[in-house]
Image: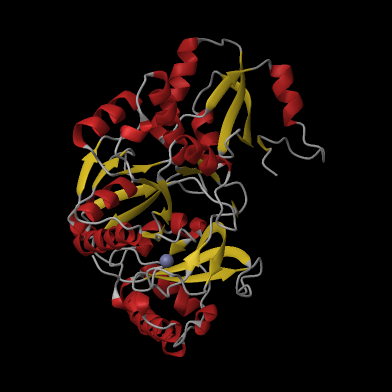
Amino acid sequence: MSIPEIEQATPSEIKSFQEEKLREVLHYVSAHSPYYRRLFKQHKINILDIQSLEDLTGIPTTTKDQLQRYNDDFLCVPKSKIIDFVTTSGTLGEPVTIGLTDKDLDRLAYNEAISFACAGIGESDILQLTTTMDRRFMAGLAYFLGVRKLGAGIIRVGAGIPELQWDTIFKFHPSYLIVVPSFLLKLIQYAHANGISLSDSGIKGAICIGEPLRNQDFSLNTLGANIKSHWDIDLYSTYASTEMSTAFTECIAQQGGHQHPELIIVEVLDENENPVPNGKEGELVITTLGVQAMPLIRFKTGDIITAHTDPCICGRNSLRLGPVLGRKKQMIKYKGTTLYPPAMHNALNDFTEVDSFVIEIYYNEIGTDEIRIKLATKKPSNDLLHRIKDHFRSKLRVTPGIEFRPIEEIQKLRLSKLGRKPISVIDLRN
Ligand SMILES: [Zn+2]
């Protein structure tokens, strides 16, 4: 798959191309989206006044709270046109639903195909998918569709089970893994423990999701360097989210994930929603292009990033995003899934046996987020622990570490230093 022409165009050509796409999407949402129609009316916005990317600041941003609260109002097509229903975690406890039409699935396939091609993957490659394809996630399906469109091969092994992963590697000889980087460490450990030769695996590289691999200067971070010291394969970061329905994947230069200008408009904003100067960090705010069911205008991702606009050696002139620096508020990236504490509160509150709890968020030794829930109960048992873990798995799709602790200890932890209301989340990452 060759590089799309627009990505090799000059920055000013890319800008005017995006401005034309912007005008199209504004027409589309003002005709079809109950949410944006209402927003434009309330704020007396005439979309004909929004002609350039700079004019975008005339439209209020959309937050995850709003997407959750008015979820159905974002839908631009009748529900019967939705083919695939996916969910992503919300800030208010309940998940946010994103629907995709047939056309949206084509767009998703195109997005992932050009993203894989960006990392140098071609028709003759076989990819091993080590993440889940079901459980209402978008990513796994996107990878499958992208590989199919690219004409490459895919083996859908799914999450976990290092033994099955290694069996598959030697049986089908994939050239790339699609993987959460910390799972690569598990594969390495398993190989070491079982006499498997990493250098005989035939794996050329890995498309890494969910956890950053690099520092802001694009050198490998602790996690990336740890992987690379054991297993010398090419590591490509890819950054995406369900709301964006778009990936930013590194090219062979590995200097940040490339924007695909035909799919998404990028803004980087400061605390007061003003654009940050070039090369400075800020919150990523996106406008989707070409989405039929649930297009988003100026959606605040909550991710703090830096955009790079200097030309890339790969021939693409599109903007690149550096590794995610952090998250606004208490966003937690846990085992490749984005989580917020209120969802964990809700899950724990479903157990009457749980008397009190605190959620501790910290960085583990490889620099990724860990969650430790300390809880007090009058009847600690393995049965209760399993039921809580199963409940987390079904509600949040991941299970954090859970420990029983005496009620006195929990109560002490819940006393906030400022002596106001009790605290239930202790963020030890800062
Ligand atoms: Zn590049």
The residue positioned farthest toward the right in the image shown: 418
Instruction: Tell me if 301 is positioned left or right of 132 in this view.
Output: right
Where residue 110 sits, quadrant-wise, is bottom left
| Residue in the image at 44% along x and 86% along y | 12
* Towards the viewer: 128 or 399: 128
* Towards the viewer: 373 or 97: 373
Q: In the image, residue 223 lies at what x, y percent?
A: 54, 40
Q: If the image is split into quadrants, where does the C terminus sit?
A: top right
Q: Is residue 274 visible?
A: yes
Up/down of 284 relative to 89, above or below = below
State the count of labels. Answer: 0
Up/down of 337 relative to 75, above or below = above
Instruction: Tell me if 405 is positioned left or right of 172 in this view.
Output: right
Q: If the image is split into quadrants, where does the N terminus sit?
A: bottom left
| Residue in the image at 28% along x and 52% along y | 142
| Residue in the image at 40% along x and 75% along y | 37
| Residue in the image at 76% along x and 25% along y | 412
Looking at the image, in which quadrant does ligand 1 appear?
bottom left
* Towards the viewer: 133 or 37: 133
**Colouring chosen for the image of the structure:** secondary structure
Q: In the image, residue 232 lies at what x, y percent?
A: 43, 41
* Towards the viewer: 234 or 40: 234
Up/down of 297 relative to 117, above or below = below
Q: In the image, residue 241 lies at what x, y percent?
A: 42, 54
Q: Is residue 80 visible?
A: no
Instruction: Tell me if 338 is positioned left or right of 116 in this view.
Output: right
Q: In the image, residue 68 lies at what x, y percent?
A: 45, 54
